[in-house]
Amino acid sequence: MRVLVIGGTEFVSLHLVRALIRDGHEVVVLNRGRRRERLPAGVRTIVCDRTDHAALRATLAGERVDALVDVTYAPTTGADVEAALEALAGRLGHALLVSTGRVYDHSLPIPYSEDTPRGLYWGEYAKNKIDGEDVLMRWHRARGLPVTILRPTHVYGPLNTRNNETFVFDRLVRGRPILVPGAGGWLRQLGHVEDLADAIATMLGAPTAFGQAYNVTGEEAVTQVGLVELIADVIKRPLTLVHIETRRGATPVPLGQNLVYDCHAVYTTTKVRSQLGIRPRYTLAAGLAQTFEWYLYLGLDRRELDFSAEDMLLK
């Protein structure tokens, strides 16, 4: 298949490009052309700012693709998603949107399935993702375009642009304590980036997936403090936990880039497993071990970091 990836050089989209090349697809990426050196050989880059809709139409006027995978968020609005579909109208086989589990109303009881009502619990981010999803489904119903929506959660792994697992690595390898917000008891569910990339590749052109949305993540739910304990066990480093209560209105105690929020986040994957046979290759422990190998390979354990803010809290 000839696949156009909007993005292609950061975290999820780069892993996706690698998976598509592995599977023998012809891959074209559309982005602003800033990190071409990251791309595998043979991948063509179309340079365009997707938010310039007129330029996008002109740039894609001669393109015909079997599939479009829309990965980027910078932020990306529903209008941006629609502009990409319009630019390829009549020359596109299957449109896939990487959305998020945060489209669900997280004030509702867990776990969240694809039937859970969506809502704006997560504010503007959720609104933009919901708008993008609605654009795809509208094109599917009104124009018959095959579309598929993926809703991943807390994606982790090599090249992660979210400082979550590396946040814990950074402190454990330097013998520092991990500051935990409160009891650290809110549940989180993480999915490995390679599993997400493989799921996207599997869905390409799959009629069963047309008109559907799928949760795509790992199978294990773990508390915030449980995640820290698991990482310490996996990388075999001693662990000191310091629980700190946050006063109302004060800056929350850091624990990664986006793991500190006061609700559970647990999702079912029954639909993607039963309909498409997709399941993760990585357990959480195995994925963290693989990510730690990448972390050491890049020498991230030797970089200079500023822990002064945490030192003040410890005092």
Image: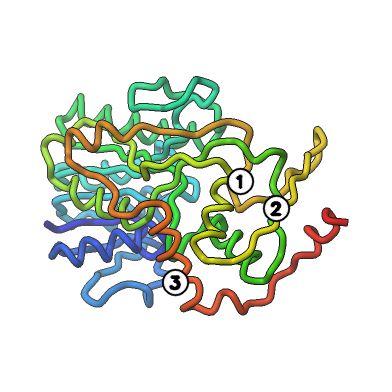
Q: Residue type at mark 2?
A: Leu
| Residue occupying the point 43% across, 24% down | 118
Mark number for residue 225?
1
- In this rendering, would 235 be left or right of 71? right
- Mark with earlier residue (2, 1): 1
The amino acid pointed to by label 3 is Trp
Pointer 2 or 3: first along the chain: 2
Residue tagged 2:
241
Number of numbered tags placed on the structure image? 3
Residue in the picture at 43% in, 27% down: 111
Indicate the position of residue 67 as horizontal and vertical percent values: 18, 50
| Residue located 49% across and 46% down the image | 75
Determine the residue positioned at 39% across, 22% down.
Answer: 116
Helix, strand, or loop for circle 3? helix
Residue receiving disc 3 = 294
Quadrant of image for the N terminus? bottom left
Viewer-proximal residue, 112 or 126?
112
Q: CA distance from mark 1 to mark 3?
A: 23 Å
Query: Which three-letter amino acid code belongs to the residue tagged 1?
Result: Val
Tell me, for residue 69, which label it has, or none: none
Residue 241 x/y as whole percent: 70, 52
The crowding category of the residue bearing disc 2, from other C-alpha atoms within 10 Å (few below 14, some 14 to 19, many at least 20), is few
